Image (tube, rainbow, N blue to C red):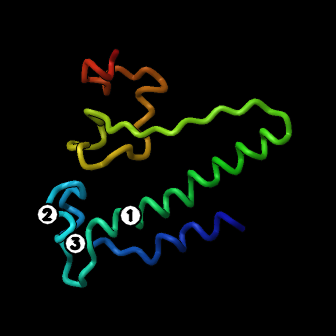
Amino acid sequence: EVGAAIPKLYSSLRTPVPSCSTPYDTPNAASNTSAKGVNGMNYMAAMRSAGDFAITCRVRQAAQRMQAHGHAVFTYYFTHTPFYSANYQHTGSLGAFHGAEVPFVFGDRFELSNPAEIA
């Protein structure tokens, strides 16, 4: 089963402590490594690759199959880093994290605190 392979993807990833606490888009992130030499940027790339395999690729495959059978299909690719999230204090280094689109999709204004996001 395809779903059984997903946990295996994550099992080989180890958090590079303390490098994961450094935002991966800062100048020193690339050189910030743990005792085992794991690079923070490499860790984030691996996590995003695993996420693409687990979510993005599956959604694309389902959409293509539905379209092939005559259904109208609409998807979106959300890339905006929210100004604020009730779940995270600092969103600047997170990128478009899982669930970041929810306030925009459902008009959840308490998380849309930036005037540009409300517009």
In the image: residue 94, left or right of residue 74: left
Q: What residue does disc 2 label?
A: 28
Counting from the top left corner in percent of width and height, residue 43 is at: 34, 68
Counting from the top left corner in percent of width and height, residue 52 is at: 52, 56
Q: What residue does disc 3 label?
A: 17
Q: What residue does disc 1 label?
A: 45
**Total numbered circles:** 3
Amino acid under label 3? Val
Q: Quadrant of residue 100?
A: top left
Tell me which numbered mark, 1 or 3, is placed earlier along the sequence.
3
Amino acid under label 1? Ala
In the image: residue 70, left or right of residue 73: right
Tell which residue pokes out farthest to the right in this image: 69
Tell which residue pokes out farthest to the bottom in this image: 36
Tell me which numbered mark, 3 or 2, is placed earlier along the sequence.
3
SS class, disc 2:
loop
Mark 3 → mark 2, Cα distance in angstroms: 15 Å
Q: Residue at x 40, y 74 (%)?
A: 13
SS class, disc 3:
loop
Q: Residue at x 27, y 43 (%)?
A: 88
Mark 1 → mark 3, Cα distance in angstroms: 16 Å
Amino acid under label 2? Asn
